[in-house]
Amino acid sequence: MTVGTIVALGEGARTSGFALAGVLVRPAEEPAGVRAAWRALPGDTALVILTQAAAEALGPEVLDAPLPLTVVMPP
C-alpha cells in the first residue's frame, strides 16, 4: 500500500524534528520561501504539516483544497 509523502513545511526550528520520523522537511523562514516550497512539493504528497506562519503565508485557498491534506501545528 502506497500512502504518499508527508512533508513538514515552515520554520526550521519547528519542523526539523519531523525528519526523525521519516517526514520530508522543507524549512522556510519567509513567506516567499514557504510559497516556493509549496509549489515544489513532490507530486505524491499526501499530507503537509504546516507551522502557523507557513499556513498564514499560504492563505485559506490553499489550506481548503482537498489535496494534499494539510494540518497546522499549534502555537
Image: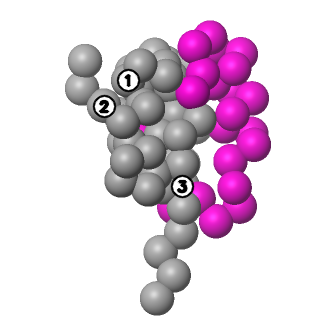
Which residue of the protein is positioned furthest toward the front in this rendering? 20
Amino acid on which disc 2 is placed: Met
Mark 1 burial class by Cα count in 10 Å: few <14, some 14-19, many 20+: some
Write the residue at 69% across / 33% down. 37
Amino acid on which disc 1 is placed: Arg
Mark 3 burial class by Cα count in 10 Å: few <14, some 14-19, many 20+: some
The label shown at residue 73 is 2
Expressed as whole percent of the image width and height from the top left, the position of residue 2 reads 51, 81
8 or 32: nearer the eye? 8
Q: Which residue is the site of mark 1?
A: 14
- Residue stretch rendered in magenta on the structure: 27-50
Instruction: Tell me: residue 31, above or below residue 69.
Output: above
Q: Which residue is the site of mark 3?
A: 68
Amino acid on which disc 3 is placed: Pro
| Eye-nearest disc, 2 or 1 | 1
N-terminal of the pair, mark 1 or mark 3, is 1
Residue 30, quarter of picture: top right
Q: CA distance from mark 1 to mark 3?
A: 20 Å
On the picture, is 24 further left or further right than 41? Answer: left
